[in-house]
Image (spheres, helix red, strand yellow):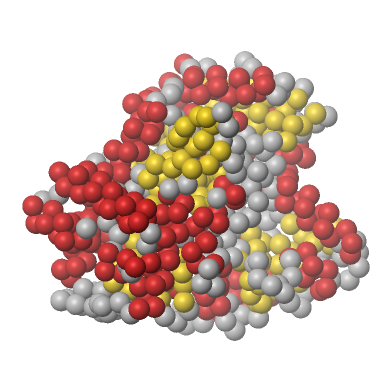
Amino acid sequence: MNKSLNSTALSPSTVTVARLADLRRQFRQHGIAACLIDDTDAHLSEYPPERFKGRSYVSGFTGSAGTLLVTENAAALWTDSRYFLQAEAQLADTGILLMKQRMEGVPSPEAWLGGQLPFGAVLGVNARCLSVSRSRQLSDALKVWNISLRDVGDLLETMWGNRPLMPSAPVMEHELRYAGLSRTEKIARIRAELAKCDADAAIITALDDVAWTFNLRGADVPCNPVFIAFAVITDDMAQLYIDAAKLPLPLQTTLTQEHIVLRPYEHIYADVAKLTGRVMLAPDTANQTLQASLQTPTIIEQLSPPTILKAQKTDTELQHIRRTMLYDGAAMVNFLFWLDQTVGNVPVTDCEIAEKLNWFRSLQPGCCGVSFETIVGHDAAGAIVHRIARPDNALPVMRQGLLLFDSGGQYLSGTTDITRTVALSSPTPQQKRDFTLVLKGLIGLSMAVFPANTPGCNLDILARRPMWEHGINYGHGTGHGIGYFLNVHEGPMSIRQEYNKITLAPGMVLSNEPGIYREGQYGIRIENMMCCIPKTETEFGRFLAFETLTLCPIDRSLIDFSMLSSAETEWLDSYHARCRAELSPLLTSEVQAFLERLI
Protein backbone atom coordinates (compact mmCIF):
# COMPACT_ATOMS: atom_id res chain seq x y z
CA MET A 1 0.00 0.00 0.00
CA ASN A 2 1.17 3.54 -0.70
CA LYS A 3 2.85 4.85 2.46
CA SER A 4 0.99 8.15 2.13
CA LEU A 5 -2.21 6.33 3.06
CA ASN A 6 -0.97 6.10 6.63
CA SER A 7 -1.09 9.87 6.90
CA THR A 8 -3.45 11.16 9.55
CA ALA A 9 -4.39 13.94 7.11
CA LEU A 10 -6.39 11.50 5.02
CA SER A 11 -10.01 10.89 5.92
CA PRO A 12 -11.01 7.35 6.96
CA SER A 13 -13.18 7.00 3.85
CA THR A 14 -10.28 7.96 1.58
CA VAL A 15 -8.08 5.34 3.22
CA THR A 16 -10.80 2.70 2.80
CA VAL A 17 -11.27 3.52 -0.90
CA ALA A 18 -7.52 3.18 -1.47
CA ARG A 19 -7.37 -0.14 0.39
CA LEU A 20 -10.24 -1.52 -1.67
CA ALA A 21 -8.29 -0.56 -4.79
CA ASP A 22 -5.18 -2.33 -3.45
CA LEU A 23 -7.26 -5.43 -2.80
CA ARG A 24 -8.84 -5.43 -6.27
CA ARG A 25 -5.44 -5.16 -7.93
CA GLN A 26 -4.74 -8.70 -6.75
CA PHE A 27 -7.84 -10.22 -8.33
CA ARG A 28 -6.33 -10.89 -11.77
CA GLN A 29 -3.19 -12.40 -10.26
CA HIS A 30 -5.28 -15.00 -8.41
CA GLY A 31 -7.94 -15.47 -11.09
CA ILE A 32 -10.83 -14.35 -8.91
CA ALA A 33 -13.76 -12.01 -9.45
CA ALA A 34 -14.42 -11.25 -5.78
CA CYS A 35 -13.07 -11.92 -2.32
CA LEU A 36 -14.45 -12.46 1.16
CA ILE A 37 -12.83 -10.76 4.16
CA ASP A 38 -13.72 -11.48 7.79
CA ASP A 39 -12.25 -10.47 11.13
CA THR A 40 -11.20 -13.89 12.33
CA ASP A 41 -8.20 -16.16 12.69
CA ALA A 42 -7.35 -19.81 12.10
CA HIS A 43 -9.49 -20.69 15.13
CA LEU A 44 -12.56 -18.80 13.88
CA SER A 45 -12.42 -16.60 16.98
CA GLU A 46 -15.14 -14.01 17.49
CA TYR A 47 -12.49 -11.74 18.96
CA PRO A 48 -9.20 -12.42 17.10
CA PRO A 49 -5.74 -10.92 17.67
CA GLU A 50 -5.23 -7.56 15.98
CA ARG A 51 -3.21 -9.18 13.19
CA PHE A 52 -6.31 -10.92 11.87
CA LYS A 53 -8.74 -8.00 11.82
CA GLY A 54 -8.66 -7.78 8.04
CA ARG A 55 -12.23 -6.64 7.53
CA SER A 56 -11.66 -3.77 9.96
CA TYR A 57 -8.42 -2.85 8.19
CA VAL A 58 -9.96 -2.76 4.72
CA SER A 59 -13.43 -1.33 5.44
CA GLY A 60 -12.87 0.85 8.50
CA PHE A 61 -15.82 -0.83 10.24
CA THR A 62 -14.61 -1.98 13.66
CA GLY A 63 -17.63 -3.87 15.04
CA SER A 64 -17.02 -7.41 16.30
CA ALA A 65 -19.37 -8.99 13.75
CA GLY A 66 -19.36 -8.42 10.01
CA THR A 67 -18.56 -9.93 6.62
CA LEU A 68 -17.10 -7.93 3.75
CA LEU A 69 -17.50 -8.98 0.11
CA VAL A 70 -15.55 -7.10 -2.55
CA THR A 71 -16.01 -7.43 -6.32
CA GLU A 72 -14.35 -5.50 -9.14
CA ASN A 73 -17.06 -2.84 -9.09
CA ALA A 74 -18.83 -3.07 -5.76
CA ALA A 75 -18.44 -3.91 -2.08
CA ALA A 76 -20.93 -4.75 0.66
CA LEU A 77 -20.73 -5.43 4.37
CA TRP A 78 -23.20 -7.51 6.41
CA THR A 79 -23.59 -6.92 10.14
CA ASP A 80 -26.28 -7.30 12.78
CA SER A 81 -28.47 -4.75 14.55
CA ARG A 82 -25.96 -4.12 17.34
CA TYR A 83 -23.83 -2.27 14.80
CA PHE A 84 -26.24 -0.66 12.33
CA LEU A 85 -25.65 2.90 13.53
CA GLN A 86 -21.92 2.39 13.95
CA ALA A 87 -21.59 0.82 10.51
CA GLU A 88 -23.55 3.62 8.85
CA ALA A 89 -21.11 6.14 10.28
CA GLN A 90 -17.91 4.20 9.59
CA LEU A 91 -18.87 3.16 6.05
CA ALA A 92 -20.03 6.63 4.97
CA ASP A 93 -18.44 7.76 1.67
CA THR A 94 -16.48 4.51 1.24
CA GLY A 95 -18.70 3.04 -1.46
CA ILE A 96 -19.32 -0.02 0.71
CA LEU A 97 -23.00 -0.90 0.94
CA LEU A 98 -24.34 -1.66 4.42
CA MET A 99 -26.41 -4.83 4.48
CA LYS A 100 -28.52 -5.03 7.63
CA GLN A 101 -28.76 -8.69 8.53
CA ARG A 102 -32.18 -10.18 9.29
CA MET A 103 -33.95 -7.08 7.95
CA GLU A 104 -36.69 -7.56 5.41
CA GLY A 105 -35.56 -7.20 1.81
CA VAL A 106 -31.84 -7.48 2.56
CA PRO A 107 -30.18 -10.13 0.35
CA SER A 108 -27.91 -12.79 1.77
CA PRO A 109 -24.20 -12.48 0.89
CA GLU A 110 -24.58 -15.36 -1.56
CA ALA A 111 -27.61 -13.85 -3.29
CA TRP A 112 -25.86 -10.50 -3.56
CA LEU A 113 -22.77 -12.14 -5.08
CA GLY A 114 -24.95 -14.06 -7.52
CA GLY A 115 -26.37 -10.76 -8.76
CA GLN A 116 -22.94 -9.15 -9.05
CA LEU A 117 -20.76 -11.83 -10.66
CA PRO A 118 -20.95 -13.56 -14.04
CA PHE A 119 -21.97 -17.21 -14.22
CA GLY A 120 -19.00 -19.43 -13.40
CA ALA A 121 -16.99 -16.76 -11.53
CA VAL A 122 -14.56 -17.53 -8.70
CA LEU A 123 -14.73 -16.19 -5.13
CA GLY A 124 -11.40 -15.89 -3.35
CA VAL A 125 -11.20 -16.93 0.30
CA ASN A 126 -8.51 -17.52 2.91
CA ALA A 127 -9.14 -21.16 3.80
CA ARG A 128 -7.21 -20.83 7.07
CA CYS A 129 -9.75 -18.26 8.25
CA LEU A 130 -12.87 -19.96 6.89
CA SER A 131 -14.68 -22.61 8.90
CA VAL A 132 -15.58 -25.97 7.47
CA SER A 133 -19.29 -25.27 7.93
CA ARG A 134 -19.12 -21.78 6.42
CA SER A 135 -17.12 -23.02 3.43
CA ARG A 136 -19.68 -25.75 2.81
CA GLN A 137 -22.62 -23.36 3.21
CA LEU A 138 -21.07 -20.85 0.80
CA SER A 139 -20.26 -23.49 -1.80
CA ASP A 140 -23.74 -25.00 -1.68
CA ALA A 141 -25.51 -21.62 -1.87
CA LEU A 142 -23.38 -20.38 -4.79
CA LYS A 143 -23.87 -23.48 -6.93
CA VAL A 144 -26.96 -21.99 -8.54
CA TRP A 145 -24.70 -19.39 -10.17
CA ASN A 146 -21.85 -21.88 -10.70
CA ILE A 147 -19.65 -19.67 -8.51
CA SER A 148 -16.79 -21.62 -6.95
CA LEU A 149 -14.45 -20.93 -4.02
CA ARG A 150 -10.68 -20.72 -4.38
CA ASP A 151 -8.17 -20.57 -1.54
CA VAL A 152 -6.01 -17.54 -2.28
CA GLY A 153 -4.43 -17.31 1.14
CA ASP A 154 -4.02 -14.01 2.93
CA LEU A 155 -4.47 -11.23 0.37
CA LEU A 156 -3.70 -8.57 2.96
CA GLU A 157 -0.14 -9.72 3.65
CA THR A 158 1.37 -7.74 0.78
CA MET A 159 -0.72 -4.58 1.27
CA TRP A 160 -1.00 -4.16 5.05
CA GLY A 161 1.90 -1.95 6.08
CA ASN A 162 2.97 -2.17 9.73
CA ARG A 163 0.67 -5.13 10.21
CA PRO A 164 0.57 -6.35 13.82
CA LEU A 165 2.74 -9.38 14.46
CA MET A 166 1.52 -12.73 15.78
CA PRO A 167 0.87 -12.16 19.49
CA SER A 168 3.49 -13.48 21.90
CA ALA A 169 2.11 -12.78 25.37
CA PRO A 170 3.24 -15.20 28.10
CA VAL A 171 0.94 -18.02 29.18
CA MET A 172 0.17 -18.65 32.85
CA GLU A 173 -1.34 -21.49 34.79
CA HIS A 174 -4.92 -21.18 36.04
CA GLU A 175 -4.39 -22.55 39.51
CA LEU A 176 -6.16 -25.74 40.54
CA ARG A 177 -7.89 -23.96 43.44
CA TYR A 178 -9.77 -21.93 40.82
CA ALA A 179 -9.98 -24.49 38.03
CA GLY A 180 -11.41 -27.20 40.27
CA LEU A 181 -10.32 -30.01 37.94
CA SER A 182 -6.75 -30.83 36.99
CA ARG A 183 -5.55 -31.10 33.40
CA THR A 184 -5.32 -34.85 33.86
CA GLU A 185 -8.96 -35.01 34.97
CA LYS A 186 -10.15 -32.83 32.09
CA ILE A 187 -8.24 -34.84 29.50
CA ALA A 188 -9.72 -38.02 31.00
CA ARG A 189 -13.20 -36.53 30.58
CA ILE A 190 -12.44 -35.65 26.95
CA ARG A 191 -11.26 -39.20 26.34
CA ALA A 192 -14.49 -40.51 27.85
CA GLU A 193 -16.43 -38.37 25.35
CA LEU A 194 -14.30 -39.78 22.53
CA ALA A 195 -15.14 -43.29 23.64
CA LYS A 196 -18.87 -42.51 23.58
CA CYS A 197 -18.52 -41.57 19.90
CA ASP A 198 -16.12 -44.40 19.09
CA ALA A 199 -13.60 -41.74 18.06
CA ASP A 200 -9.83 -42.19 18.08
CA ALA A 201 -8.81 -38.52 18.24
CA ALA A 202 -10.20 -35.03 18.75
CA ILE A 203 -8.70 -31.91 17.19
CA ILE A 204 -9.37 -28.99 19.53
CA THR A 205 -9.41 -25.72 17.62
CA ALA A 206 -11.29 -23.03 19.61
CA LEU A 207 -8.91 -20.99 21.76
CA ASP A 208 -11.11 -21.08 24.87
CA ASP A 209 -11.48 -24.86 24.52
CA VAL A 210 -7.69 -25.22 24.48
CA ALA A 211 -7.25 -22.89 27.46
CA TRP A 212 -9.90 -24.75 29.49
CA THR A 213 -8.49 -28.18 28.69
CA PHE A 214 -4.99 -27.40 29.88
CA ASN A 215 -5.85 -24.99 32.74
CA LEU A 216 -3.81 -22.28 31.05
CA ARG A 217 -4.59 -18.64 30.37
CA GLY A 218 -2.96 -16.08 28.13
CA ALA A 219 -3.22 -12.55 26.77
CA ASP A 220 -3.01 -12.91 23.00
CA VAL A 221 -6.47 -11.36 22.56
CA PRO A 222 -7.52 -8.15 24.35
CA CYS A 223 -10.07 -8.83 27.11
CA ASN A 224 -10.04 -12.60 26.46
CA PRO A 225 -7.51 -14.61 28.54
CA VAL A 226 -6.67 -17.02 25.73
CA PHE A 227 -3.58 -17.81 23.66
CA ILE A 228 -2.99 -18.96 20.09
CA ALA A 229 -2.81 -22.77 20.12
CA PHE A 230 -4.31 -25.99 18.82
CA ALA A 231 -4.51 -29.35 20.58
CA VAL A 232 -4.95 -32.99 19.64
CA ILE A 233 -6.21 -35.55 22.17
CA THR A 234 -6.10 -39.30 21.57
CA ASP A 235 -6.44 -42.32 23.86
CA ASP A 236 -2.77 -42.22 24.76
CA MET A 237 -1.55 -38.78 23.78
CA ALA A 238 -2.22 -35.10 24.45
CA GLN A 239 -0.44 -32.64 22.16
CA LEU A 240 -0.43 -28.86 22.56
CA TYR A 241 0.53 -26.85 19.46
CA ILE A 242 1.91 -23.54 20.68
CA ASP A 243 4.84 -21.19 20.40
CA ALA A 244 6.80 -22.67 23.32
CA ALA A 245 8.45 -19.31 23.99
CA LYS A 246 5.15 -18.23 25.56
CA LEU A 247 5.49 -20.88 28.24
CA PRO A 248 7.80 -20.19 31.21
CA LEU A 249 10.35 -22.99 31.58
CA PRO A 250 8.89 -24.29 34.88
CA LEU A 251 5.47 -24.56 33.21
CA GLN A 252 7.00 -26.38 30.23
CA THR A 253 8.56 -28.84 32.67
CA THR A 254 5.25 -29.36 34.47
CA LEU A 255 3.37 -30.00 31.25
CA THR A 256 6.00 -32.46 30.06
CA GLN A 257 5.90 -34.31 33.38
CA GLU A 258 2.14 -34.64 32.92
CA HIS A 259 2.79 -36.30 29.54
CA ILE A 260 1.60 -33.34 27.49
CA VAL A 261 3.62 -33.10 24.30
CA LEU A 262 4.53 -29.57 23.19
CA ARG A 263 4.65 -29.07 19.42
CA PRO A 264 5.33 -25.97 17.29
CA TYR A 265 2.11 -24.17 16.40
CA GLU A 266 2.46 -24.46 12.60
CA HIS A 267 3.11 -28.21 12.75
CA ILE A 268 -0.59 -28.88 13.36
CA TYR A 269 -1.38 -29.14 9.64
CA ALA A 270 1.34 -31.70 8.88
CA ASP A 271 0.66 -33.67 12.07
CA VAL A 272 -3.09 -34.09 11.56
CA ALA A 273 -2.35 -35.56 8.14
CA LYS A 274 -0.79 -38.50 10.02
CA LEU A 275 -3.88 -39.20 12.15
CA THR A 276 -5.65 -42.48 11.48
CA GLY A 277 -8.98 -43.90 12.50
CA ARG A 278 -12.01 -41.84 13.42
CA VAL A 279 -11.14 -38.17 13.99
CA MET A 280 -13.51 -35.72 15.71
CA LEU A 281 -13.63 -32.17 14.35
CA ALA A 282 -15.92 -29.23 15.16
CA PRO A 283 -16.98 -27.80 11.77
CA ASP A 284 -17.80 -24.34 13.15
CA THR A 285 -14.37 -23.75 14.72
CA ALA A 286 -12.10 -25.86 12.50
CA ASN A 287 -10.74 -24.07 9.46
CA GLN A 288 -11.02 -25.47 5.95
CA THR A 289 -7.25 -25.95 5.56
CA LEU A 290 -7.14 -28.07 8.70
CA GLN A 291 -9.90 -30.35 7.49
CA ALA A 292 -8.32 -30.61 4.04
CA SER A 293 -5.08 -31.72 5.71
CA LEU A 294 -6.75 -34.80 7.19
CA GLN A 295 -6.07 -38.02 5.29
CA THR A 296 -8.31 -40.30 7.33
CA PRO A 297 -11.54 -41.31 5.56
CA THR A 298 -13.64 -41.03 8.72
CA ILE A 299 -14.22 -37.56 10.15
CA ILE A 300 -16.79 -37.14 12.92
CA GLU A 301 -18.19 -33.63 12.69
CA GLN A 302 -19.65 -32.47 15.99
CA LEU A 303 -19.02 -30.09 18.84
CA SER A 304 -15.61 -30.37 20.42
CA PRO A 305 -15.85 -32.23 23.77
CA PRO A 306 -14.42 -29.28 25.77
CA THR A 307 -17.12 -26.99 24.33
CA ILE A 308 -19.83 -28.97 26.11
CA LEU A 309 -17.81 -29.85 29.21
CA LYS A 310 -16.75 -26.28 30.00
CA ALA A 311 -20.25 -24.88 29.39
CA GLN A 312 -21.62 -26.76 32.41
CA LYS A 313 -19.77 -25.17 35.30
CA THR A 314 -18.74 -27.42 38.17
CA ASP A 315 -19.79 -26.80 41.78
CA THR A 316 -16.30 -25.42 42.47
CA GLU A 317 -16.53 -23.01 39.56
CA LEU A 318 -20.02 -21.87 40.58
CA GLN A 319 -18.88 -21.22 44.15
CA HIS A 320 -16.11 -19.00 42.80
CA ILE A 321 -18.50 -17.26 40.39
CA ARG A 322 -20.92 -16.40 43.21
CA ARG A 323 -18.06 -14.93 45.23
CA THR A 324 -16.90 -13.00 42.17
CA MET A 325 -20.38 -11.51 41.83
CA LEU A 326 -19.98 -10.00 45.30
CA TYR A 327 -16.76 -8.29 44.24
CA ASP A 328 -18.24 -7.14 40.94
CA GLY A 329 -21.42 -5.89 42.61
CA ALA A 330 -19.40 -3.90 45.15
CA ALA A 331 -17.44 -2.30 42.30
CA MET A 332 -20.68 -1.40 40.54
CA VAL A 333 -22.27 0.21 43.62
CA ASN A 334 -19.10 2.19 44.32
CA PHE A 335 -19.20 3.35 40.72
CA LEU A 336 -22.88 4.32 40.97
CA PHE A 337 -22.07 6.37 44.06
CA TRP A 338 -19.23 8.13 42.23
CA LEU A 339 -21.49 8.73 39.23
CA ASP A 340 -24.16 10.28 41.47
CA GLN A 341 -21.60 12.59 43.09
CA THR A 342 -19.85 13.55 39.85
CA VAL A 343 -22.24 14.06 36.92
CA GLY A 344 -23.61 17.56 37.02
CA ASN A 345 -21.04 18.75 39.55
CA VAL A 346 -17.86 18.51 37.49
CA PRO A 347 -17.36 18.20 33.70
CA VAL A 348 -17.10 14.54 32.66
CA THR A 349 -17.20 12.60 29.40
CA ASP A 350 -18.51 9.15 28.60
CA CYS A 351 -14.93 8.01 28.05
CA GLU A 352 -13.94 9.17 31.54
CA ILE A 353 -16.99 7.40 32.97
CA ALA A 354 -15.90 4.15 31.29
CA GLU A 355 -12.37 4.53 32.65
CA LYS A 356 -13.69 5.17 36.16
CA LEU A 357 -15.92 2.09 36.01
CA ASN A 358 -12.95 0.00 34.93
CA TRP A 359 -10.89 1.48 37.78
CA PHE A 360 -13.44 0.55 40.45
CA ARG A 361 -13.50 -3.00 39.12
CA SER A 362 -9.69 -3.21 39.05
CA LEU A 363 -9.61 -2.70 42.83
CA GLN A 364 -11.44 -5.96 43.48
CA PRO A 365 -9.63 -9.17 44.54
CA GLY A 366 -8.39 -11.30 41.65
CA CYS A 367 -9.38 -8.84 38.92
CA CYS A 368 -7.24 -9.28 35.79
CA GLY A 369 -8.86 -6.60 33.62
CA VAL A 370 -12.05 -6.12 31.67
CA SER A 371 -13.93 -8.87 29.82
CA PHE A 372 -14.74 -6.53 26.90
CA GLU A 373 -14.35 -2.87 26.08
CA THR A 374 -16.70 -0.93 28.34
CA ILE A 375 -19.75 0.50 26.57
CA VAL A 376 -21.12 3.84 27.75
CA GLY A 377 -23.92 5.66 25.94
CA HIS A 378 -25.61 8.87 27.07
CA ASP A 379 -29.03 9.71 25.60
CA ALA A 380 -28.84 9.29 21.79
CA ALA A 381 -25.46 7.55 22.01
CA GLY A 382 -27.12 4.85 24.12
CA ALA A 383 -29.06 3.73 21.05
CA ILE A 384 -25.73 2.67 19.48
CA VAL A 385 -25.81 -0.79 21.03
CA HIS A 386 -22.05 -1.39 21.19
CA ARG A 387 -20.64 2.13 21.26
CA ILE A 388 -17.11 2.24 22.65
CA ALA A 389 -16.26 5.65 24.13
CA ARG A 390 -12.64 6.63 23.48
CA PRO A 391 -10.73 9.91 23.87
CA ASP A 392 -11.12 10.68 20.15
CA ASN A 393 -14.93 10.31 20.17
CA ALA A 394 -15.72 11.22 23.78
CA LEU A 395 -18.96 13.07 24.46
CA PRO A 396 -19.84 15.21 27.48
CA VAL A 397 -22.33 13.72 29.93
CA MET A 398 -24.73 16.20 31.52
CA ARG A 399 -27.15 15.71 34.39
CA GLN A 400 -30.00 14.89 32.05
CA GLY A 401 -31.55 11.96 30.22
CA LEU A 402 -30.46 8.33 30.41
CA LEU A 403 -27.04 6.74 30.74
CA LEU A 404 -26.43 3.14 29.65
CA PHE A 405 -23.26 1.28 30.64
CA ASP A 406 -22.37 -2.29 29.73
CA SER A 407 -19.20 -3.68 31.29
CA GLY A 408 -17.54 -6.75 32.72
CA GLY A 409 -14.45 -8.03 34.42
CA GLN A 410 -12.03 -10.89 34.11
CA TYR A 411 -11.27 -12.40 37.50
CA LEU A 412 -9.19 -15.45 38.39
CA SER A 413 -12.48 -16.70 39.85
CA GLY A 414 -14.83 -15.92 36.96
CA THR A 415 -15.94 -13.63 34.15
CA THR A 416 -18.65 -10.99 34.57
CA ASP A 417 -20.99 -9.10 32.24
CA ILE A 418 -23.54 -6.54 33.45
CA THR A 419 -25.55 -3.68 31.96
CA ARG A 420 -27.45 -0.99 33.81
CA THR A 421 -29.36 2.05 32.59
CA VAL A 422 -29.88 4.96 35.00
CA ALA A 423 -31.77 8.24 34.89
CA LEU A 424 -29.66 11.36 35.29
CA SER A 425 -32.78 13.56 35.56
CA SER A 426 -36.51 13.07 35.92
CA PRO A 427 -37.48 10.48 33.28
CA THR A 428 -40.24 11.07 30.75
CA PRO A 429 -43.34 8.85 30.68
CA GLN A 430 -42.04 7.16 27.52
CA GLN A 431 -38.67 6.47 29.12
CA LYS A 432 -40.35 4.95 32.18
CA ARG A 433 -42.63 2.82 30.03
CA ASP A 434 -39.75 1.56 27.90
CA PHE A 435 -37.57 0.84 30.93
CA THR A 436 -40.39 -1.03 32.63
CA LEU A 437 -41.03 -3.13 29.53
CA VAL A 438 -37.35 -4.08 29.47
CA LEU A 439 -37.48 -4.88 33.19
CA LYS A 440 -40.57 -7.04 32.69
CA GLY A 441 -38.68 -8.96 30.01
CA LEU A 442 -35.70 -9.44 32.30
CA ILE A 443 -37.91 -10.66 35.15
CA GLY A 444 -39.98 -12.89 32.88
CA LEU A 445 -36.89 -14.81 31.78
CA SER A 446 -35.41 -14.77 35.29
CA MET A 447 -38.53 -16.47 36.68
CA ALA A 448 -38.75 -19.11 33.95
CA VAL A 449 -39.38 -22.73 34.89
CA PHE A 450 -39.02 -25.12 31.96
CA PRO A 451 -38.63 -28.82 31.13
CA ALA A 452 -35.17 -30.30 30.86
CA ASN A 453 -33.87 -30.55 27.28
CA THR A 454 -35.37 -27.18 26.33
CA PRO A 455 -33.27 -25.14 23.86
CA GLY A 456 -32.73 -21.48 24.69
CA CYS A 457 -34.54 -20.30 21.57
CA ASN A 458 -37.78 -21.64 23.10
CA LEU A 459 -37.38 -19.25 26.06
CA ASP A 460 -36.49 -16.11 24.13
CA ILE A 461 -40.13 -14.99 23.87
CA LEU A 462 -40.34 -14.66 27.66
CA ALA A 463 -38.03 -11.64 27.47
CA ARG A 464 -39.57 -10.15 24.32
CA ARG A 465 -43.27 -10.61 24.97
CA PRO A 466 -43.83 -7.41 27.02
CA MET A 467 -42.21 -5.37 24.24
CA TRP A 468 -43.91 -7.22 21.40
CA GLU A 469 -47.28 -6.41 22.96
CA HIS A 470 -46.37 -2.72 22.44
CA GLY A 471 -44.98 -3.20 18.93
CA ILE A 472 -41.36 -2.95 20.11
CA ASN A 473 -38.44 -5.32 19.50
CA TYR A 474 -34.65 -5.47 19.77
CA GLY A 475 -32.34 -6.97 17.17
CA HIS A 476 -29.72 -8.67 19.31
CA GLY A 477 -29.94 -11.96 21.20
CA THR A 478 -31.36 -12.12 24.70
CA GLY A 479 -28.72 -14.35 26.25
CA HIS A 480 -25.27 -15.74 25.52
CA GLY A 481 -23.12 -18.19 27.44
CA ILE A 482 -20.36 -16.75 29.63
CA GLY A 483 -17.00 -18.37 30.29
CA TYR A 484 -15.14 -18.97 33.55
CA PHE A 485 -12.12 -16.64 33.44
CA LEU A 486 -12.52 -17.11 29.70
CA ASN A 487 -14.45 -15.51 26.84
CA VAL A 488 -17.40 -13.35 27.81
CA HIS A 489 -19.25 -14.88 24.84
CA GLU A 490 -19.22 -18.66 25.19
CA GLY A 491 -21.16 -21.31 23.32
CA PRO A 492 -22.70 -23.58 22.47
CA MET A 493 -25.96 -22.49 24.16
CA SER A 494 -27.78 -19.21 23.69
CA ILE A 495 -31.15 -17.55 24.22
CA ARG A 496 -32.18 -15.84 21.01
CA GLN A 497 -34.79 -16.05 18.26
CA GLU A 498 -32.57 -17.99 15.86
CA TYR A 499 -32.80 -21.75 16.22
CA ASN A 500 -30.09 -23.40 18.31
CA LYS A 501 -30.53 -27.11 18.99
CA ILE A 502 -28.31 -27.04 22.08
CA THR A 503 -30.48 -27.52 25.16
CA LEU A 504 -29.98 -25.76 28.46
CA ALA A 505 -28.53 -27.80 31.32
CA PRO A 506 -27.67 -27.24 34.99
CA GLY A 507 -24.41 -25.35 35.44
CA MET A 508 -24.69 -23.30 32.26
CA VAL A 509 -24.14 -19.60 32.91
CA LEU A 510 -25.85 -17.13 30.57
CA SER A 511 -26.65 -13.46 30.24
CA ASN A 512 -30.21 -12.06 30.36
CA GLU A 513 -30.20 -8.74 28.48
CA PRO A 514 -33.35 -7.41 26.80
CA GLY A 515 -33.31 -3.83 25.56
CA ILE A 516 -35.06 -1.02 23.68
CA TYR A 517 -33.17 1.38 21.41
CA ARG A 518 -34.75 4.53 19.99
CA GLU A 519 -32.46 6.02 17.36
CA GLY A 520 -31.59 9.64 18.11
CA GLN A 521 -33.17 9.46 21.59
CA TYR A 522 -31.79 6.85 23.99
CA GLY A 523 -31.00 3.22 24.62
CA ILE A 524 -32.17 1.05 27.52
CA ARG A 525 -30.73 -2.33 28.45
CA ILE A 526 -30.71 -4.24 31.71
CA GLU A 527 -28.43 -7.25 31.94
CA ASN A 528 -27.88 -9.85 34.64
CA MET A 529 -25.96 -13.09 34.62
CA MET A 530 -27.83 -16.23 35.61
CA CYS A 531 -27.14 -19.92 36.07
CA CYS A 532 -29.34 -22.80 34.96
CA ILE A 533 -30.26 -24.93 38.00
CA PRO A 534 -32.48 -27.96 38.77
CA LYS A 535 -35.94 -26.91 39.95
CA THR A 536 -38.11 -29.97 40.54
CA GLU A 537 -38.94 -33.43 39.29
CA THR A 538 -42.51 -34.67 38.89
CA GLU A 539 -44.31 -37.42 37.07
CA PHE A 540 -44.01 -35.14 34.02
CA GLY A 541 -40.22 -35.11 34.15
CA ARG A 542 -37.37 -32.87 35.32
CA PHE A 543 -37.79 -29.10 35.37
CA LEU A 544 -35.09 -26.42 35.39
CA ALA A 545 -34.97 -22.76 36.38
CA PHE A 546 -32.53 -19.86 36.60
CA GLU A 547 -30.59 -18.49 39.55
CA THR A 548 -29.73 -14.80 39.15
CA LEU A 549 -26.03 -14.31 39.87
CA THR A 550 -25.52 -10.57 39.31
CA LEU A 551 -25.87 -8.31 42.33
CA CYS A 552 -26.46 -4.65 41.53
CA PRO A 553 -29.53 -2.45 42.10
CA ILE A 554 -31.89 -1.56 39.26
CA ASP A 555 -32.91 2.11 39.00
CA ARG A 556 -36.31 2.35 40.69
CA SER A 557 -36.83 5.93 39.48
CA LEU A 558 -37.25 4.55 35.94
CA ILE A 559 -39.91 1.99 36.87
CA ASP A 560 -43.63 2.49 36.33
CA PHE A 561 -44.76 0.20 39.13
CA SER A 562 -48.36 0.25 37.86
CA MET A 563 -47.14 -1.86 34.92
CA LEU A 564 -45.67 -4.60 37.15
CA SER A 565 -47.64 -7.59 38.35
CA SER A 566 -47.50 -8.55 42.02
CA ALA A 567 -45.15 -11.43 41.14
CA GLU A 568 -42.82 -9.07 39.26
CA THR A 569 -42.80 -6.57 42.14
CA GLU A 570 -42.07 -9.40 44.57
CA TRP A 571 -39.16 -10.56 42.40
CA LEU A 572 -37.71 -7.04 42.30
CA ASP A 573 -38.07 -6.52 46.05
CA SER A 574 -36.46 -9.88 46.75
CA TYR A 575 -33.61 -9.11 44.35
CA HIS A 576 -32.93 -5.76 45.98
CA ALA A 577 -33.04 -7.37 49.44
CA ARG A 578 -30.31 -9.75 48.26
CA CYS A 579 -28.25 -6.83 46.96
CA ARG A 580 -28.55 -5.07 50.32
CA ALA A 581 -27.72 -8.13 52.42
CA GLU A 582 -24.82 -9.43 50.33
CA LEU A 583 -23.15 -6.21 49.18
CA SER A 584 -23.44 -3.98 52.25
CA PRO A 585 -20.60 -5.73 54.17
CA LEU A 586 -18.22 -4.85 51.31
CA LEU A 587 -19.10 -1.12 51.27
CA THR A 588 -18.18 1.89 53.37
CA SER A 589 -20.90 3.32 55.60
CA GLU A 590 -21.33 6.24 53.19
CA VAL A 591 -21.83 3.95 50.19
CA GLN A 592 -24.08 1.66 52.26
CA ALA A 593 -26.35 4.63 52.91
CA PHE A 594 -26.35 5.39 49.19
CA LEU A 595 -27.31 1.77 48.43
CA GLU A 596 -30.22 2.04 50.87
CA ARG A 597 -31.51 5.08 48.98
CA LEU A 598 -31.27 3.22 45.67
CA ILE A 599 -33.34 0.23 46.72
112, 430: nearer the viewer: 430
Kindly identify the residue that appears in the image at 77 percent across and 32 percent down.
299
Task: Name the side, left or right, on which 433 lies relative to 209.
Answer: left
Quarter of the figure with the N terminus: bottom right
Q: Position of residue 495 (x, y in %)?
A: 54, 51
Give above or below for 113 relative to 322.
Answer: below
533, 144: nearer the viewer: 533
8, 148: nearer the viewer: 148
Kindly identify the residue that appears in the image at 38 percent across and 34 percent down.
318
Task: Name the side, left or right, on which 528 lies relative to 461.
Answer: left
So how many labels did they put on this image? 0
Which quadrant would residue 191 be assigned to in this image?
top right
Quarter of the figure with the C terminus: bottom left
Kindly identify the residue that appears in the image at 65 percent across and 51 percent down.
499
Which quadrant would residue 112 be assigned to in this image?
bottom right
Give above or below for 437 relative to 528.
Answer: below
